[in-house]
């Protein structure tokens, strides 16, 4: 398993746990963290096939990711800031497109870039002490790592505008109510809950999950007619896999499937 200066990797069961490991800065997205996230994705996309899901969390008890590294940003000019934002766009798009589910286990502050990292994940599980927000307007800025795109898609335009325009922070219970978080659990149970979901997913066809995720990502920007075409292609592609052959045969033969994973 690869080693990183700002990230810690561990595995439990079918899941790989990625911990952003900069607690002194509340796990802020420094240039070093962003570079390591890119390196992690390069590694996972080529060698991570043994894992059936990824869980992203933050080191320490206070913060998932507190946001961008404002000290570094303060030294940037506009072109450097653009490059920083585009690099994070690439990271979040790659996270969103991984062929396995990605769960954000939000254990504290998920503000600015932290909320945007969480939004790029398939599910958000939050500890009871977690909080979310896009507070960039307090710095005279706007979301730059995908928040103005993904937040409205997750919770709707009106609520997203209210959070972005006010810079307001919300607690995990409110995040659950508005559909930003999937679950809220005691902090001590957060990783175990995410692991349980990964194991539930690990029991089904890996190719079907990958097919479904690819199609859902593609559909995000499409109208219903175009999205239905994507779904039809995904259904046809799934039908040709050995997983589908085994799954259908097992159903007919009234036995549990043994998915080959291809």
Image (tube, rainbow, N blue to C red):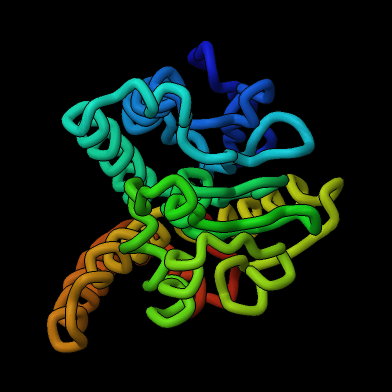
Count of labels in the image: 0
Residue appearing at x 35%, y 45% in the figure = 92
Q: Position of residue 255 (x, y in %)?
A: 59, 70
Q: Where residue 134 sits: x, y (%)?
A: 49, 56
Residue 123 showing in the rendered view: yes
Instruction: Give the percent coordinates (x, y) of residue 260.
Output: 43, 49
Which residue: 32% across, 50% down? 97
Residue found at x 59% / y 48%: 110
The residue lying toward the viewer, choosing from 212 and 93, is 93
- In this view, the residue in front, 155 or 123, is 155
Name the residue located 52 percent from the left edge and 11 percent from the top edge.
5
Left-right relation of 210 to 53: left
Check the image and report above or below for 109 versus 11. below
Measuring from the top left, give residue 221's x and y in whole percent: 21, 71
Q: Is residue 147 left or right of residue 125?
A: left
Image-quadrant location for residue 209: bottom left
Res. 75 image quadrant: top left
- Residue 190 vs 71, above or below: the answer is below
Q: Is residue 102 visible?
A: no
Closest to the observer, 99 or 104: 104
């Amino acid at each position: 398993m690869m080693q990183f200066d700002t990230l810690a990797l561990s595995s439990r069961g079918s899941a790989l746990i990625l911990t952003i490991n900069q607690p002194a800065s509340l796990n802020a997205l420094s240039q070093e963290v962003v570079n390591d996230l890119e390196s992690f994705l390069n590694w996972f996309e080529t060698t991570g096939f043994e894992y059936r899901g990824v869980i992203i969390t933050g080191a320490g008890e206070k913060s998932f990711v507190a946001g961008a590294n404002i000290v570094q940003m303060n030294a940037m000019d506009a072109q450097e800031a653009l490059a920083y934002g585009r690099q994070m766009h690439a990271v979040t798009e790659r996270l969103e497109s991984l062929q396995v589910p990605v769960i954000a286990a939000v254990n504290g502050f998920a503000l600015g870039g932290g909320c945007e990292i969480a939004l790029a994940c398939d599910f958000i599980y939050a500890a009871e002490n977690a909080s979310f927000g896009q507070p960039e307007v307090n710095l005279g800025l706007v979301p730059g790592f995908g928040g103005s795109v993904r937040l409205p898609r997750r919770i709707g335009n009106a609520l997203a505008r209210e959070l972005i325009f006010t810079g307001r922070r919300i607690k995990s219970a409110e995040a659950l109510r508005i559909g930003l978080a999937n679950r809220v659990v005691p902090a001590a149970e957060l990783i175990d809950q995410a692991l349980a979901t990964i194991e539930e997913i690990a029991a089904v066809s890996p190719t079907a999950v990958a097919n479904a995720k690819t199609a859902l990502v593609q559909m995000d920007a499409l109208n219903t007619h175009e999205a239905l075409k994507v779904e039809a292609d995904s259904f046809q592609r799934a039908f040709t896999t050995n997983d589908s052959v085994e799954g259908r045969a097992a159903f007919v033969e009234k036995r549990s499937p043994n998915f080959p994973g291809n």
